[in-house]
Amino acid sequence: MESFYRTHNYLLEHTSSPVRRSLMDEINWNDRLIGIKGSRGVGKTTFLLEYAREFFGAGNRECLYINLNHFYFTERTLTDFAGEFRDKGGKVLLIDQVFKYPDWSKELRYCYDHYPDLKIVFSGSSVMRLKDENPDLSGRTVSYNLRGFSFREYLNLTTGSTYPLYTLDELFAGHTRIAYDICSHVNPLDYFQDYLHHGYYPFYLEKRNFSENLLKTMNMMLEVDVLYIKQIEQSYLPKLRRLLYLLAIAAPSAPNVSQLSKDIETSRATVMNYIKYLTDARLTHMLYAEGETFPKKPAKVYMHNTNLMYPIRPSEVNVQAIRETFFYNLLHKDHELHTGHRNAHFTVDGRHPFRIEEAPRAKNNPDIYYAVGKMEIGHDNQIPLWLFGFLY
């Protein structure tokens, strides 16, 4: 136990988040069992440690961070460890890499039922299905998704600013004023392209080649977050990698499932399952017409975020695809997106049609909102694309 406290204090001293994540204020920390899900590379470990630092501080033995990837947990059960921690005055146990531990859901359930005065916050892969595939935790755990940096978070970090987030309704009501206030201090377009290229994943701050690091992360998503968690044989990895590549170079587009099944030499049903796994891993997005959902074929497949589009074919990235992917990814957190009608690319929340444009339009359809790439300050139904990066 003491070695874990030493590790905990060392990590608090040497790990810090460069920007406060908005999710910190969205979580109800009074809940007893909280799951933090997210794709590889978005900063789940750092987020847990920031919670410990902000709510408890270094040296406080009521809170403890542990990683279930530790060899110690090959002979010691999580329930025994949690019980000992609680008996010694522990109140909050932060558990990282929970999916690496056998029967983790059953033991979390045991802790929940038998240690009512112990709070557990655990992190896991976005591929995990806490409710659908873990009946032990149904009705007991509350899960949240940690995403990569928004453009707002990236801009705050890069410029040392503290710009607040805005809701979509606030943008509709006052986007001109909001953009003017921001642009009076900084020109967001000076930073926007860098964000699209490398600003989503916090590890861009590390002194390593970002593209190579991202490619490594993408492969780890396939090998661990898809194959390991979904219990798919390692021999199928080349098919998954090939499928991701084919989807990436065509995105956004309607997937030709028959052709894809021939290309990766598997069935149409398996192709659809694989696309779903890639979406669960936060590598792709599936866009459906309203009223349709998986297992039907999506109307379009997008990459999950713009950073993923550059390392695969860096010299052939389509600028319009980048703009649409940015819009989809930033709105997807809190809104429902479906295919658009009458020249709109998207319908948001079933009632707001959006078209994504490069430059302002002299003539436009008053019944459509325009998200415009090359625009600092908008007017009427034309809103700067970068401003949607302030939604979280």
Image (cartoon, grey):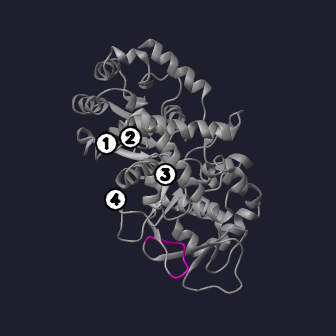
* Residue ID for mark 4: 295
Marks 1 & 4, CB-CB < 8 Å contact: no
Q: Quadrant of residue 21?
A: top right
* Residue ID for mark 1: 141
* Residue ID for mark 3: 263
Q: How far, Cα to Cα, is label 1 from label 3?
A: 41 Å
Q: Amino acid at mark 4?
A: Pro
Q: How far, Cα to Cα, is label 2 from label 1?
A: 7 Å
Q: Could you tell which of marks 3 and 4 lies nearer the N-terminus?
A: 3
Residue in the picture at 33% in, 38% down: 33
Q: How far, Cα to Cα, is label 3 from label 2?
A: 37 Å
Q: Position of residue 176 (x, y in %)?
A: 67, 73
Magenta segment boundaries in residue numbering: 342-349
Choose mark 3 or mark 2, whichever is in front: 3
Choose mark 3 or mark 4, whichever is in front: 3
Numbered mark located on residue 35 in the image: 2
